[in-house]
Image: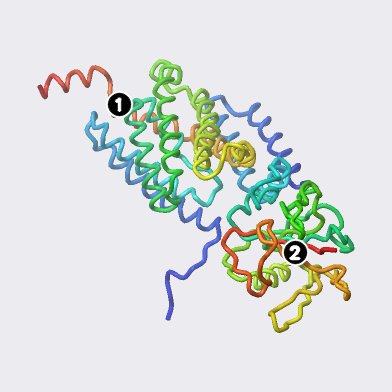
Amino acid sequence: MQDLTLVFGAVAIITIVIMKTIDEDNRLKFISGTWILALVLTAPMLSELWASQAISYVDDDGNSHDGLPQKWNGTQVICFDFSSDSSHPVFMSGTTMISTSGESISVNDAFNGSVASWDGSFVGDAAMTGVCIGGLSGYTNGFDLTLDAVALLPNRDLEVIYDVGDYGSFVTSIGGVAQADDWSSWWGLYINGAEASVGIGDLQIDADDVITWRIES
Amino acid sequence: MFDAHNIALSATETLLLNAAILGIIVFALLKAERKLDESSSWIMLGILAIFAIGGRILFEPLPNIQPVTVIVLLTGIYFGAPRAFALAGIVALLSNLLVVGHGPWTLFQVIGWGGVGITGALLSDWLRTDQKLNVNRIALVAFISGFAFNWIVSLSILIQTDISVLLPYIFNGLLYDFYHATGNLAFAAWMAVPLGELMHRHRITPNENAVSEVVTN
């Protein structure tokens, strides 16, 4: 952000200098050249800044990609919702959007993930607390996506612990938040807002699916 | 074995390579242009199409910066709306097929660039004062055209989504519209006069048409 202010402050000064010194026929050449150079050099920073601003204008219901960064449209996304047991030490408020490079793109305070609750009632406006990792592609199996996505984060903030039983892999703990031994809380699995009908190891996913893990109680 | 084509280029390196290739094309075509018949406006249109397609492909490493919009605008001014529209179609289709990607949006690009050509034709008297291009006015129209063109192309998402997505989509793209508009500003500043002179030599005037028709009849 500071870098951007610096670059465009310099651009403004150079523009004024060009206006004062260069003759009218060539003025526009140098001004536009300066602007293009500045825009191209700051393109990655600018687009990140813009994406984080634009996200708050995105409609939040209907499509499972709504509320997620628009550049994730058509890609695979995985979300982790700690809202009913918000004891995750890092992701305590809002939903942090994390890119495939493991960097935080933005935080959406109103993201609800369009997730229906396990008993069928729609969670609706209740904002989710946690993380979404998006921009992923090429996965066909939900478990592969889960494990690879959490590995993108530094510091193992979302470490997944699972058992392999008779019915396949079973996730017992994510990011240090574990299911209760007496089953009063557990990690629920959703795909595109609907509860998954199979376990994570058997979950087939398409190119633009959104998987959500929620701690339920 | 040594694989001569197995070289990974960075965006900057690709750009420099492309700029060198574009330089060779422009130099060769400018040499050839001097030998053209004064009234050969069709060959001139072919050369313009090569400029535009080449420019679009070669500037691809830069975000949304390409010379097509300005070339079509100038074509509208000198050769009229129908030929500018034809040029827009050829450039959009060929450059999308060759590199950028062809789909339903190509039709919207043809309409968008065609619209820019029509604007150039309609405003040709205002954009040229005493047979001389008014670069500042062209730059203004080119800048606005950047936004207008992108919004027309944005309409192509209505094929698969409903209208409520359109405004957030356009908002999300405003930064990239600005890149296009600023790129147009630079191309207008640097290219309008030399390209205008080129086109002026092969322009079609009402008189010329009348004469050639009399002769062929």
Residue at left offset 58%, top offset 55%: A74
Whole-angstrom CA distance, mark 2 to mark 1, is 66 Å
Q: Quadrant of the C terminus of chain B?
A: top left
Q: Amino acid at mark 1?
A: Arg
State the SS at label 1. Answer: loop
Does the image show residue B193? no
The residue lying at 54 percent from left, 48 percent from top is B62
Residue at 59% across, 63% down? A137
Q: Which of the image's four quarters has the N terminus of chain B?
A: bottom left
Evaluate whether residue B53 shows in this view.
yes
Chain letter of disc 2?
A: A
Please give left or right for residue A187 compared with residue A71 in the image. right
Residue A4 image offset from top left, x and y in percent: 73, 44
| Residue B102 in the figure: left or right of residue A31 | left
Q: Which one is closest to the eye, mark 2 or mark 1?
A: 2
Check disc 2 and report the residue beneath it.
A213
| Tag 2 near tag 1, CB within 8 Å | no
The lab-note entry on whether marks 2 and 1 share a chain reads no
Q: Position of residue A41 (x, y in %)?
A: 64, 48
Colour scheme employed for the rendering of this structure: rainbow
Q: Position of residue B51 (x, y in %)?
A: 38, 42
Label 2: how many Cα within 10 Å (few below 14, some 14–19, many 20+): many
* Residue nearest the observer in this picture, B192 or A145: A145
Residue B203 bears which disc, if any? 1
Q: Residue A177 got which mark?
A: none
Give the side of residue B131 with respect to residue A94, left or right: left
